Image (cartoon, helix red, strand yellow):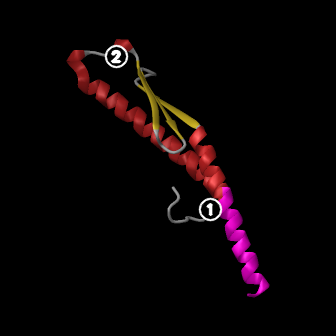
Amino acid sequence: MNKNFMRQIKQVQELQAKLAKAQEELASLKVEATSGGGAVKVVMDGKQKVLSIKISPEVVNPQDVELLEDMIMAAVNEAQEKSQALISSRLGQITGGLKLPGLM
């Protein structure tokens, strides 16, 4: 095998190792999003797993469950957007902006 090919294989292996490390680090990072003026708070990790949902007791109104549902959905969606931005930022630094299949 020629030296150029071997160098490319080594670079790919190094990139794989960096990506694996970055994905591990993402799992330990957290993003937080709120809605309803802070009445609903969602915490999500860098792998987009919801870690917690906190709801202020004063917004729990049996007569208006739909509002609470909307606030939860808004907070989860915002947390997901923040988590996606975090993932793109971290992995983009490693891949130089390349969009690799299987990576968020």
Q: Quadrant of residue 9?
A: bottom right
Labelled disc at residue 75: none
Q: Main secondary structure of the magenta part?
A: helix
Look at the picture and state if 5 lies above or below 45: below
Instruction: Kindly identify the amino acid type of the residue bearing the numbered disc 1.
Output: Gly
Near-viewer residue (61 or 6): 6
For mark 1, what is the residue? 97
Image coordinates of residue 80 in percent, x first then y, are 46, 42
Residue wearing tag 2: 59
Residue at the front extreme, as displayed? 1
Q: Position of residue 92 (x, y in %)?
A: 62, 57
Q: Which residues are magenta?
A: 1-18
Decide which of 80, 45 is in the foreground and name it. Answer: 45
The secondary structure type at the circle numbered 2 is helix
Quadrant in the rendering for residue 19:
bottom right
Q: Kindly identify the residue that appears in the image at 64 percent across and 62 percent down.
A: 16
On the question of residue 90 being in view, the answer is no
What's the CA distance linking mark 2 and mark 1? 42 Å
Q: Looking at numbered disc 2 in the image, what kind of residue is underneath it?
A: Val
Q: Residue at x 59, y 44 (%)?
A: 26
* Residue lying at the far left of the rendered structure: 63
Indicate left or right for 49 with 8 as reference.
Answer: left
**Residue at 64% over, 51% down:** 22
85 lies above or below 43: below
